Image (cartoon, helix red, strand yellow):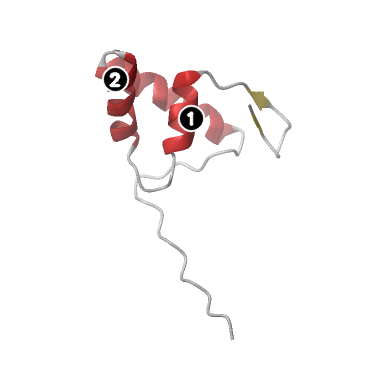
Amino acid sequence: MIMSATDSTFFTLDEVATVIWQAADGQTPLSQIALGICQQFDVDQQQAEADAEQFVDELALHGILLVSDVPASDPEPRQVP
């Protein structure tokens, strides 16, 4: 279960949504995540991509996930004195 801190909306994750959530690392393209869903759940690539995009868009709408066309950059490590 995921909750939006912005509007307190709850999302209950099924198995596929859990795979998407766990793979959303800011580096892995959604198309690659959808390919993994196809392999794991025996679903058509086009349908997996459409469903994954819909789920990700819904999370983004509620401020839970940021969507970008480019990979997130790693923040520079802080040095401890």
**In which quadrant will I find the C terminus?**
bottom right
The amino acid at mark 1 is Asp
Q: Residue 37: give x, y in percent of width and height.
A: 34, 23
Q: Which residue is mark 2?
A: 38
Q: Nearer the viewer, residue 36 or 55?
A: 36
Along the line of sight, the residue nearer the viewer: 21 or 57: 21
| Distance (Cα) linking label 1 and label 2 | 19 Å
- What residue is pinned by disc 1? 57
39 vs 64, left or right, is: left
Disc 1 vs disc 2: Cβ atoms closer than 8 Å? no
Q: Amino acid at mark 2?
A: Cys
Tell me the crowding category of disc 1: few under 14, some 14 to 19, or many 20 or more residues within 10 angstroms, Cα based: some
Q: Quadrant of residue 38?
A: top left
Task: Say which label, 1 or 2, has the lower sequence index.
Answer: 2
Looking at the image, residue 80 sits to the left or right of residue 5; the answer is left
Question: Vertical placement of 33 versus 38: above or below?
Answer: below
Occupied quadrant, residue 39: top left
Residue appearing at x 43%, y 45% in the figure: 25
Res 29 label? none
- Label 1 or label 2, whichever lies nearer to me, is 2
Q: Is residue 40 above or below residue 23?
A: above
